[in-house]
Amino acid sequence: MFRIAFSAAIAAGLFVSASASRAAVISFETFSHGDRFTNGQTYNFDRFNARIETNNNRGPNQAQIYDSRISNGRDSDLQSPRNVFDNSVYQGGDLMIIAENSNGPADDDADGGTITFFFEKLVRFSGITLIDGEEGQNEISVLARGRDNTLDFVLEDTFTGDDLWRSYVFDSVVTNEITVQFGGSGAFDQIVIGEVPLPASALLFATAIGGFILVRRQRIIAQLGRPAEH
């Protein structure tokens, strides 16, 4: 009886561990062209909740979605398909930009600024796509900070210019704060994050507790003289 209960607990623990390791790609495809993100509001991105904070030099301090697949967009520099550093082609999609204005058509702000994701819990950050960084100005930078506000990761994208993009993949960084900093205009897409797995000690503790509860339940059922439920 204990063997069955304990095995079930181990299976449950393995399921939790496997679920925690799943990665997600935030691609903004659940949003529409022109959608704006209210500063300080929390949004759901493929099961991850994050508060969005946007700052730029002249307002309106809003992040916005730009669909690079449309043919009549305000900014031709963001249209797809686009050239990439190795001559492959990016098919585009819904990109995130800093809004140039508070009520006009979607367009990225040439003055640059920052967009920061404050995740409700720690995540593993391991990739991002940067698009159309302003040539002749500061590059697009990506920063990640831990809960103690230490700067744990810095990525500087110098591959800037019209019709240029680049996808970055790197060793995962555990963080709950990701900032994209624009020296001028630009956009980003496809943030790769994953859940932080439980520490081994916590997983073993949860497994032991689960085994104890299942064994106790079986004993109570036996004492009541009822057959165990399957």
Image (cartoon, helix red, strand yellow):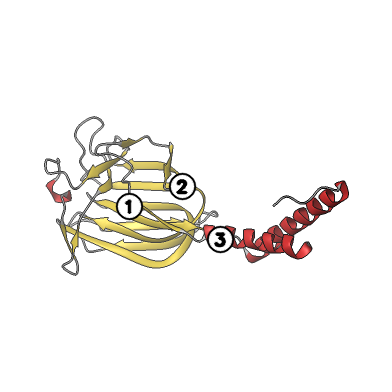
Q: Kindly identify which residue carries mark 1.
A: 181
- In percent of width and height, residue 145 lies at 47, 56
Q: Kindly identify which residue carries mark 2.
A: 47
Residue 87's disc is none
Identity of the amino acid at label 1? Gln
Q: Residues within 10 Å of mark 2 (few under 14, many from 20)?
A: few
Tell me how far mark 2 sits from mark 1, CA to CA. Answer: 24 Å
The answer to which quarter of the image holds residue 134 is bottom left
Q: Nearer the viewer, residue 9 or 55?
A: 9
Identity of the amino acid at label 2? Arg
Q: Which residue is pictured at 72% across the width and 56% down the height? A: 210
- In percent of width and height, residue 20 lies at 53, 58
In the displayed image of the protein, which residue is found farthest to the top? 103
Q: Let me know if residue 82 appears in the view.
A: yes
Q: Kindly identify which residue carries mark 3.
A: 197
Left or right: residue 144 compared with residue 114: right
Element at badge 2?
loop
Q: In the figure, 109 relative to 38: above or below? A: below
Tell me how far mark 3 sits from mark 2, CA to CA. Answer: 15 Å
- Asked if the residue at tag 3 contacts the one at tag 1, i.e. Cβ–Cβ closer than 8 Å, the answer is no
